[in-house]
C-alpha cells in the first residue's frame, strides 16, 4: 500500500491509500461507506521502518480502523500538510493505479470509496 496525496482543483484535498488490486481496495473497510453522513478523522504516525500508520476514525460512531505499513514520501507529506493546514474538510479514499492514473475504487455495490473527513493530523516521532 502507498499513501496518495492530492490537491485537486476546485475539490477538497485528497488523502488516500493505493492498493495493488481493485478487489482488495473495494472490500477493505467497505462497511464504513454506510456512514457517509458522518465526518471521520485521520491520524498519521510514521514508524521506525520508514512506513506510516494511518488511523481512520469517527468519534461519534466509536469506529476506528488502522492501515499499517503504508509506503510514503515524508517530504511530500509534510508539504501536503502545510498546503492543507487551513482546510476544514478532506476526502479520503481507496485507489488503484491504472495506466499511470489513480482510479477511485468501488465496493461490491459500486459505491465509490470516498469518505469525508474534518481533520488530518500528523503525529511526529519523539
Image (spheres, rainbow, N blue to C red):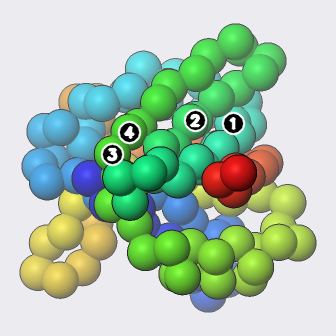
Q: Residue at x 11, y 81 (%)?
A: 99
Q: In this view, does 120 lie above or below 57?
A: below
Q: In which quarter of the image is residue 55?
A: top right
Sequence-first tag of 3 and 2? 2
Secondary structure found at label 4:
strand
Disc number for residue 68:
4
Q: Position of residue 35 (x, y in %)?
A: 60, 24
Give yes or no for contact between labels 3 and 4 (Cβ–Cβ under 8 Å). Answer: yes
Q: Quadrant of residue 14?
A: bottom right
The residue lying toward the viewer, choosing from 104 and 65, is 65
Q: Where is residue 95 in the image (x, y as percent from the top left)?
A: 31, 57
Characterize the local packing of mark 1: few (<14), some (14-19) or many (20 or more) Cα atoms within 10 angstroms: many
Outermost residue, bottom side: 9
Outermost residue, front side: 126
Q: Name the residue under label 2.
A: 56
Count of picture labels: 4
Q: Quadrant of residue 4?
A: bottom left
Q: Position of residue 48 (x, y in %)?
A: 44, 51
Secondary structure found at label 3:
strand
Q: In this view, does 119 lie above or below 68?
A: below
Q: Work out whether residue 104 can be spotted.
A: no
Tell me how far mark 3 sits from mark 4, CA to CA. Answer: 4 Å
Disc number for residue 40:
1
Q: Is residue 81 above or below residue 106?
A: below
Q: Mark 3 points at which residue?
A: 69
Give yes or no for contact between labels 1 and 2 (Cβ–Cβ under 8 Å). Answer: yes
Judged by depth in the image, the label closer to the viewer, 3 or 2, is 3
Amino acid at each position: 500500500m502507498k499513501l496518495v496525496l492530492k490537491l485537486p482543483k476546485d475539490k477538497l484535498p485528497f488523502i488516500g491509500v493505493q492498493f495493488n488490486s481493485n478487489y482488495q481496495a473495494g472490500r477493505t473497510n467497505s462497511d464504513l461507506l454506510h456512514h457517509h453522513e458522518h465526518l471521520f478523522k485521520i491520524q498519521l504516525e510514521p514508524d521506525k521502518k520508514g512506513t506510516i500508520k494511518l488511523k481512520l476514525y469517527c468519534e461519534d460512531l466509536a469506529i476506528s480502523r488502522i492501515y499499517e505499513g503504508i509506503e510514503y514520501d515524508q517530504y511530500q507529506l509534510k508539504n501536503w500538510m502545510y498546503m492543507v493546514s487551513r482546510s476544514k474538510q478532506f476526502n479520503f479514499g481507496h485507489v488503484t493505479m491504472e495506466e499511470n492514473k489513480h482510479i477511485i475504487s468501488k465496493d461490491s455495490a459500486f459505491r465509490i470509496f470516498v469518505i469525508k473527513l474534518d481533520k488530518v493530523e500528523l503525529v511526529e516521532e519523539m
